[in-house]
Image: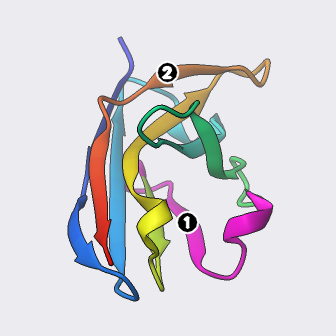
Amino acid sequence: QVQLVESGGGLVQAGGSLRLSCAASRILFSSAAMGWFRQAPEKQRELVASITNIGYTNYADSLKGRFTISRDNAKNTVDLQMNNLKPEDTGIYYCAAARQSGSWAYWGQGTQVTVSS
């Protein structure tokens, strides 16, 4: 069974930075598109950023320039660097892996990010 384990969440002041990391196992990582999603309280889960198996990236329009997704196929990890954080970035951040069909099929347990004003 695919395992995705997130780390790096926490409490940070507005304007600060955090780096989330996701370690994947039991998956052909180098072939999988990976993504980061987030869910704020009482809101739907939304895509933050995604990266294809060969490194093409996609970001939510509102986050371009502040967040950067990257992957290391040798280590089976995908990271999310978050800069200039804002209180509205608060939420649970989830790592996800896609099937070859493109559907987001595998999810981590999530890591909490809280940005104080």
Q: Is 36 left or right of 100, judged from the image as shown?
A: left
Q: Secondary structure beneath disc 2?
A: strand
Which percent across, then down, holds residue 81? 46, 73
Q: Which residue is mark 1?
A: 70
Q: Which residue is mark 2?
A: 106
85 shown above or below 5: below
Tell me which amino acid carries mark 1. Ser
Quarter in which the N terminus is drawn = top left
Instruction: Check disc 1: other Cα within 10 Å, few if <14, some if 14-19, many if 20+.
Output: many
Asked whether 48 or 72 is in front, the reply is 48
Q: Is 31 left or right of 70, judged from the image as shown?
A: right
Marker disc for residue 38 = none
Mark 2 or mark 1, which has the lower sequence index? 1
User: Does the magenta-highlighted stretch encompass residue 63?
Assistant: yes
Q: Residue at x 57, y 73 (%)?
A: 67
| Residue 74, quarter of the rendered image | bottom left
Q: Residue at x 58, y 30 (%)?
A: 44
Quarter in which the C terminus is drawn = bottom left
Q: What is the span of residues highlighted in magenta in the rendered image?
A: 59-77
Which percent across, then down, holds residue 17? 36, 82
Which percent across, then down, holds residue 100? 74, 22
Tell me which amino acid carries mark 2. Tyr
Q: Is 115 left or right of 31, judged from the image as shown?
A: left
Q: Residue furthest top?
A: 1
| Residue 97, quarter of the rendered image | top right
Q: Residue at x 59, y 42 (%)?
A: 34
76 shown above or below 106: below
What's the coloring here?
rainbow
User: Does the magenta-highlighted stretch encompass residue 10?
Assistant: no
